[in-house]
């Protein structure tokens, strides 16, 4: 029986901040992570160990991790994105317990994002998986452009399915399908996720949607119908990819949580506290965007 519980990973402090014009300080990034955690979000992606020259907003992620670790009351599981073995070593040395490694469903995206081929990215990830097992670190394998690539066009479902199977077998704790540029539509999502759930079960699978074409929430719904119970979302709908033209914000955490809770699923997240975190995200970044449900949701919660 498929669970009624949904596990949300808020990627706002990484995916949300990496493309914002305003670069936050370490203290501000920690403030945002703590606000999200206060709302009982189960997992938070706090940053990435990429070159600060390539993504200046992610400089000093090691300091963010160490600052959070020094907080006696902070217990929310955190993860960090890594691009390669060097990033893994930096994350491990900073005390990371979970890392996310990016795989690619197209060579075009692999070259633009990581200056390597799809095959090279897979080999690096396999090497990281072997080392992470020895180090006691969990690895999440994220398949970028799982539905469409801005450089190579629509991704082949068979290619994505093969990557998922390979890395689940190799020992990845979870594999996440990423609609990196927000090009997927619900039928695509339903077909892909239903096939993968049938082959591998739902426990180790997740989805990551952007809202570029205003279909992010519909795609979450389609994945839920297939049995997916793990989703990446971003506080206030912040997001985008510096290396993916046209990619806009991630699907907003507040929108996803509201929809799922109203459908009878249990996220364990406090919506009132989540809206406060969304306000903090907007205040810190100066972003005008937020979850599309936010205005209604605030009024609704005030009446309760």
Image (cartoon, rainbow, N blue to C red):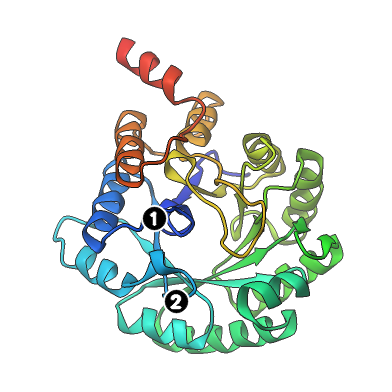
In the image, residue 136 sits, relative to residue 24, either above or below, namely below
> What residue is pinned by disc 2?
53
In the image, residue 129 sits, relative to residue 265, either above or below, namely below
Marks 2/1 in contact by CB < 8 Å: the verdict is no
- How far apart are the two marked residues, 2 and 1, measured between alpha carbons? 18 Å
Residue 275 in view here: yes
Q: Which residue lies furthest to the top in this view?
A: 303
> What residue is pinned by disc 1?
13
243 to the left or right of 257: right
Q: Which label sits in the foreground, 2 or 1?
A: 2
Q: Nearer the viewer, residue 266 or 21?
A: 21
252 to the left or right of 71: right
Where is residue 35 shown, x and y percent of the image?
Answer: 27, 45
Q: Pointer 1: residues within 10 angstroms few (<14), some, or many (20+)?
A: many
Residue 304 in view here: no
Q: Pointer 2: residues within 10 angstroms few (<14), some, or many (20+)?
A: few
How many marks are shown on the rendered structure? 2
Where is residue 189 shown, x and y percent of the image?
Answer: 75, 46
The quarter of the picture where the N terminus appears is top right
In the image, residue 258 sits, relative to residue 35, either above or below, namely above
- Based on the displayed image, in which of its 4 quarters is residue 267 positioned? top left
Where is residue 11 shown, x and y percent of the image?
Answer: 46, 54
In terms of secondary structure, where does tag 1 sit?
helix
Disc sitting over residue 242 in the figure: none
Q: Nearer the viewer, residue 157 or 215?
A: 215
The quarter of the picture where the C terminus appears is top left
In terms of secondary structure, where does tag 2 sit?
loop
């Amino acid at each position: 029986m498929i669970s009624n519980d949904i596990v949300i990973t808020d990627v706002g402090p990484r995916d949300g901040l990496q493309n914002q014009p305003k670069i936050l300080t370490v203290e501000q990034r920690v403030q945002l992570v703590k606000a999200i955690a206060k709302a009982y979000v189960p997992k938070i992606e706090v940053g990435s160990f990429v070159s600060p020259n390539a993504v200046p907003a992610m400089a000093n992620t090691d300091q963010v991790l160490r600052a959070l670790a020094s907080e006696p009351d902070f217990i929310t599981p955190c993860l960090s994105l890594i691009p390669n073995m060097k990033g893994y070593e930096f994350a491990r040395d900073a005390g990371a317990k979970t890392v996310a490694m990016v795989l690619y469903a197209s060579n075009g995206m692999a070259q633009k994002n990581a200056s390597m081929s799809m095959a090279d990215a897979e080999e690096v990830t396999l090497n990281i998986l072997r080392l992470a097992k020895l180090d006691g670190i969990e690895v999440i394998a994220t398949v970028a452009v799982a539905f469409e690539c801005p450089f190579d066009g629509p991704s082949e479902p068979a290619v994505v399915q093969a990557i998922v199977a390979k890395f689940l077998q190799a020992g990845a704790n979870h594999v996440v399908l990423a609609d990196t540029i927000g090009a997927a539509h619900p039928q695509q999502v339903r077909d892909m996720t239903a096939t993968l759930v049938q082959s591998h079960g739902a426990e180790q699978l997740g989805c990551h949607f952007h809202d570029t074409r205003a279909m992010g929430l519909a795609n979450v719904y389609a994945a839920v119908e297939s049995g997916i119970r793990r989703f990446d979302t971003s506080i206030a709908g912040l997001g985008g990819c510096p290396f993916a033209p046209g990619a806009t914000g991630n699907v907003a955490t507040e929108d996803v949580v509201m929809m799922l809770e109203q459908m009878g699923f249990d996220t364990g997240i406090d919506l009132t506290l989540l809206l406060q975190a969304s306000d903090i995200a907007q205040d810190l970044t100066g972003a005008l965007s937020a979850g599309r449900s936010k205005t209604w949701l605030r009024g609704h919660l005030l009446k309760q």
